[in-house]
């Protein structure tokens, strides 16, 4: 008999009253849509339960994000959290279906142009819902070497800007040169969750890649319309798509033997590398633009157990 998946109990009437107003308004419209589709009450209750748990997660862990602002990374973070709580593949697939159906409704009503869940692969039976990758120092060095061999300066700049700023994929996609101060190595007025404007800092190595990218475009007469990262489809009012950066990330992952590499993994990886190098949790949390250290500790830092193993090895029992 198959093992029953652990249930996640997050229902909280008080928190539901304080869910992002835009999310609640769209959720109420969705109730009307479900009622005219002749769904059974059990089906409606199941969809609603899944969605309310997701709303509460965003309330508690993602600055009470609106469903219209939630990106592929934000939703993947929620799926990964559910997996960590003990959900099996079948329950995860049901939750993914509920969220996907909600976004399908939003597209049908022309409230959104594309659904962020379209970029997330659903797991097959026996496979994990998401693999959280924490790049090691050795893997970062391998990435550096492989990208150098590949000789795509834009890909190099993207990888190391994403890694060292620890910015979310949507923020990276919407960066313009006017926000970048190469001398100070910062990106200013970067739009983050809940409309917050934050400052991102990047490494000296990243600065060198960005300078090379500027030189390459100038030498080849490439019009980037002011955007850092471009494709032939980018225009002045149309930045690169988050999904395109996701594909770039997968390409880099395949180069280094990490096919599961995902844009959000850069954020987790550098946070962990900094913490293990001695940077305080408070400082790492500030760099991630978290409101406090709890989210940083729970979802972003992979504990380094090597010291614990060394202590055990030195004790003879």
Image (cartoon, helix red, strand yellow):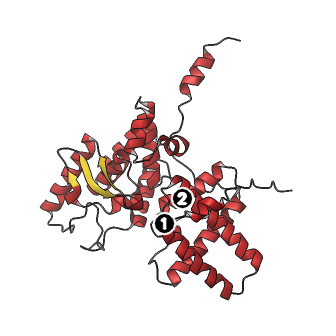
Residue at x-position 25% and y-position 48%: 186
Residue 30 screen position, x and y as percent: 59, 79
Callout 1: SS? loop
* Mark 2–mark 1 distance (CA, rounded to whole Å): 8 Å
Vertical relation: 258 (above or below) 314: below
Quarter of the image with the N terminus in it:
bottom right
Residue 66, label in figure? 1
Label 1 packing within 10 angstroms: few (<14), some (14-19), many (20+): many
Q: Position of residue 126 (x, y in %)?
A: 70, 56
Q: Which residue is tagged 2? A: 58
User: Which x, y percent locates residue 294?
Assistant: 52, 42
Q: Is residue 313 in view from this perspective? A: yes
- Classed neighbour count for the residue bearing mark 2: other residues with Cα under 10 Å, few (<14), some (14–19), many (≥20): many
- Which residue occupies 50% across, 69% down? 21
Give the side of residue 111 with respect to residue 52, left or right.
left
- The quadrant in which the C terminus is found is top right
Is any part of residue 67 visible from this angle? no
Is residue 40 rendered to the left or right of residue 147? right
Q: Residue at x 40, y 46 (%)?
A: 288
């Amino acid at each position: 008999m198959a093992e029953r998946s652990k249930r996640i109990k997050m229902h909280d009437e008080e928190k539901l009253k304080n869910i992002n107003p835009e999310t609640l308004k769209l959720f109420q419209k969705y109730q009307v849509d479900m009622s005219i589709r002749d769904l059974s009450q059990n089906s409606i209750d199941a969809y609603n339960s899944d969605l309310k748990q997701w709303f509460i997660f965003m309330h508690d862990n993602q600055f009470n994000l609106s469903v219209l602002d939630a990106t592929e990374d934000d939703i993947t973070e929620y799926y990964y959290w559910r997996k960590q709580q003990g959900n099996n593949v079948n329950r995860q697939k049901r939750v993914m279906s509920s969220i996907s159906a909600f976004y399908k409704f939003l597209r049908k009503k022309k409230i959104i142009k594309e659904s962020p869940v379209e970029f997330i692969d659903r797991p097959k039976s026996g496979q994990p819902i998401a693999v959280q990758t924490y790049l090691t120092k050795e893997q970062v060095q391998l990435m550096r070497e492989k990208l150098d061999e590949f000789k795509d300066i834009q890909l190099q700049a993207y990888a190391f800007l994403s890694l060292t700023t620890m910015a979310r994929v949507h923020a990276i996609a919407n960066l313009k040169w006017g926000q970048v101060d190469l001398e100070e190595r910062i990106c200013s007025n970067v739009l983050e969750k809940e409309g917050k404007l934050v400052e991102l800092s990047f490494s000296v190595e990243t600065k060198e890649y960005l300078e090379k990218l500027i030189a390459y475009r100038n030498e080849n007469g490439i019009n980037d319309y002011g955007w850092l990262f471009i494709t032939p489809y980018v225009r002045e009012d149309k930045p690169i798509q988050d999904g395109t950066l996701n594909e770039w990330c997968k390409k880099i992952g395949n180069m280094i033997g990490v096919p599961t590499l995902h844009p959000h993994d850069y954020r987790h990886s550098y946070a962990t590398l900094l913490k293990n190098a001695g940077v305080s949790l408070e400082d790492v949390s500030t760099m991630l633009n978290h409101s406090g250290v709890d989210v940083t500790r729970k979802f972003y830092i992979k504990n380094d157990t090597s010291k614990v193993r060394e202590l055990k090895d030195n004790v003879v029992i």
